[in-house]
Amino acid sequence: MAERTVVAEAPATPPHEPHVPHEPRLTRRGLIGSAAALAGLWSMATQESAHAAPPAVAADVDPGALLPKLVRRITLGLTPAELTLAQNLGYDGYLEYHLNHAAIPEDANLTTRLSALTTLNMIPLDLFPLQAGQVIGELSEAQLLRAILSKRQLFERMVEFWTDHFNIDITKGDDRYLKTYDDRTVIRPFALDTFPNLLNASARSTAMLYYLDNTGSIAGNANENYARELLELHTLGADGGYTQTDVEQVARCLTGWTMWGRGQGTNTGTFRYDSTRHDTGQKVVLGHVIPARSAAAGIQDGVDVLNILIDHPNTARYLATKMCKWFLSENPPTSVINAVAGVYTATRGDIKAMLREVLKANVVAEAPLKYKRPFHMFVSGLRAVNAQVATTSAIRTQLTGAGHQQFYWPTPDGYPDKVDFWGGFILPRWNFAASMMNSAGSQTNGGINGVTVDHAAFFAGATTADAMADRINTTIFAGELPTAERNRLRDYLLPNAPTTLRQREALGLALSTPSFQWY
Amino acid sequence: MMNPDTHACPEYRELSRRGFMALTGAGLAAAAIAPACFPRVALAKDYRSSMRDVVIQVYLRGASDGLSMCVPWGDNAYYAARPTLAVPRPDSGQANRCTDLNGFFGLAEPLLPLLPAYQDGKLLIVHATGSHDPSRSHFDAQRFMEVGKPNDPALGTGWLGRHLAGVGPMIQNPLLRGVGIATGLQRTLVGGPQTLPIPNLDTFGLTGFTTSIPSRSSALTSLYTGAAAPLGAAATDTINTIDLLNTIEFAGYVPAGGAVYPSGAFGLALKQSAALIKAQVGVEAIAIDVGGWDTHDQQGNLTGFMAGLMNTLALTLAAFYRDMTTGVAPTFSLVVMSEFGRRVAENGSAGTEHGHGNCMFVMGNCIDGGRVLANWPGLGAGQLFENRDLQVTIDYRDILAEIVSSRMGNPNLASVFPDPAYTPVFRNVLAC
């Protein structure tokens, strides 16, 4: 599975080319400068993509002005350090820095913290005897710590993306153990690799095969669950041109794709092709004849299916659409989807190459604001105020209350990424922000156990309400907080020389603003 | 159990209200209607004719196996297709046999708690129903069913959300009209004014220092004034709803008639819903989800996993029925539905695959129940949808449309079900 050589896309905007003055709508300041503008934007965002203009030509865009927006799109929350990095590297340089994730030195603290989570690196044989709570807890803690602390932020955003794309409910039986194995051997190795490699790994993921019941599928009366979701959710999309017959044929091809049970030594819980369960007859999948094969050679049926799916134009379109939705908007422009799908086809699913297309400056410039999901909002809040996180269990409790604990979505479609779904339940966001700021490392005063925020360091040197509001604006919002919201936070800090409690609550309110809910 | 006749406001006898007199700030608006116990007494006498039903949608996520719920034991093809999963005939003498309903259909043993409502004539079972959309994708099928129109990905609002948007509220200046008992709003309710997802009605409040809640609440109100949709309305509704729900003592709520809700999420959701409905604060629509019905493997409809799901469902609905029909309470219509049924033939792993037609359960004060409404297409060869599934012979919207039209005060069915290809056919599911 060597990394495919990719011809990098030519940058949309040469970073040093003098730019033509752009329209105000292209900057975040312009975008969120007024409630009216936001409302208009929202209405734009909810239109069908047919109404969206094609991306502007490169000359329209000032990559420098886009940097805060780019940082917000490809990380789990803007920090002053990330913004500085982006400013130093420039638009394309910063993007390439994050795409080349393996070269980014990892946060030393994170590395230390992860090394203490011993189950992360265990094989199923060693996981099965443990308490499920420990295994799930360590994986969940790792996911949160990585999101908060990792320097490889775009990588973590893609881990989140693929975790939803190949969703597995961690509460189902052996998946309490096997999801850890799936995370380590499927999602993380290939999150920025190629889709063929990722799909091949997922199709052999015992966590997935168990979750979608392929482990019990037998010749003669195959289980269709995994086969259907492989087509519908993992590759072609629900309107991807397959029929019920195709589902049944794919299910036949995949009979025998299962896992080794317990008592099989180091094989325990790992992928097994069980030829005795395989349907050896001829199948036809999406018009492709898959010949009758001996049971021993029958694993090739599944491999053929995966290749048919990987090379199908609807897979290109479906993945391109989903990736654009992840980074750009719920209704991305058709022209951008087509361009990304073209890259998929040309590179046979090189994820980095696709991302270069999705994240071109002129494309990002046109993207309307996106609503953060609770996990994103929580993590970006912790990052924004440089919270020190000693343990994540209390954060995870609040995430559960907000409906977005990682790995707990029950159905294979993954957590929704739509404001229709998340927009109404805003209360847990406010409460998370408030309780985070009540924290002194404990739940005293309603704080979050294990989370500490040093408000004095945040406001260092700022003593007046105005100076503090400005500090919030520059540190958390890259100076782009709308004036009305900025002034409301200032008012909360009046009269000058606010108490510690007042300062901390103002910081909590900053994370509760409308502006902080979008990225 | 209190005697309802001794209290001026009997339906709230069990709802000890906390602190609505002490509401301040944003709470004043809530207080203006929250203690409307007194004016509502006048309405109570002719409530059933003058007011609309509260509608509750219970959605069985994952595609429930209706053939294991309302069992077509009179159709021999059922037994041929289900050698290990079929529910035994009522006259079989076997364990787990179904209970005959009408000489053809039987109620699965775990669902027997529903019999009292059925025998009261307040529970209707509709069979071979569902959406005509042929999709066997959970997610497409749920979406198209919830928006009320097959195969229209551009339609984003739900049938119940559009209903709420299309009719005036049941009370003046309501703060909350629709509730999804969920962390994310169900598609069914999208588009509804004053509609929020609330996973637990009892714990919906601001945390942090108690003493600063008024000032923080005020700051949040100010921050969100004029905020982009949907956040501006969501924030306003949230702050108003916090105060509203604070006036209802959910934790101490005592269901009427000695009804006991099962523990667990669904029991809590319907119990809290009953308290909310009885408080008459203007809530008209509630959506609740019950997951776990995607039984591809080891379905266990006789004694196992699905049997447990069915039993919890039935016990909870039975408790709600008893609670809401003992003494005086607002009228309701409750529908239980799922995105599609499951394949007639069982698979090789003691489970069932995605199918098409299914059954619905419809319960309420004015439901003409105590019967199974079906135009049964048969399960034999040549009778199946795409040679494998139960056909849909009654559009699920026919059932909803009649309730919307007659019990929810909304004659504009073309707005609730905006599908030029669909003309509602009333199936006479209402007794009043």
Image (spheres, rainbow, N blue to C red):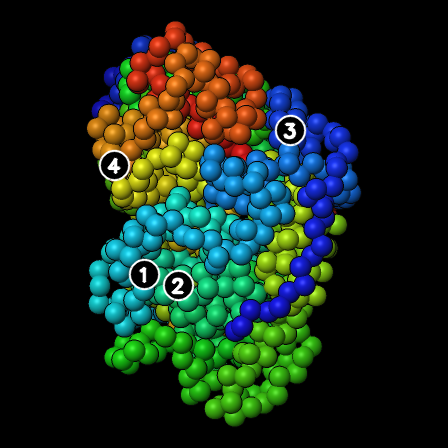
Asked if residue A39 is positioned above or below residue B290 in the image, the reply reads: above
In whole angstroms, how far apart are the C-alphas of marks 1 and 2?
A: 7 Å
Distance, label 1 to label 3, CA atoms, is 42 Å
Residue occupied by mark 3: A31
Name above or below for residue B282 compared with residue A391: above
Residue A81, position as x, y percentages in the image? 47, 38
Q: Which amino acid type corresponds to the residue marked 4 in the rendered image?
A: Asn
Label 1, on which residue?
A120
Q: Is residue B410 left or right of residue B117?
A: right
For residue A184, which numbered disc appears in the image?
A: 2
What's the mark number on residue B307? none
Q: Residues within 10 Å of mark 2 (few under 14, many from 20)?
A: some
> CA–CA distance between discs 1 and 4?
23 Å
Q: Tell which subunit mark 1 falls on.
A: A
- In the image, A78 versus B338, the foreground residue is A78
Query: Do marks 2 and 4 share a subunit?
Result: yes
Left or right? Give the position of B194 relative to A52: left
Q: Which residue corresponds to mark 4?
A: A449
Tell me the crowding category of disc 4: few under 14, some 14 to 19, or many 20 or more residues within 10 angstroms, Cα based. Answer: many
Q: Which chain hosts label 2?
A: A
Chain to which mark 3 belongs: A
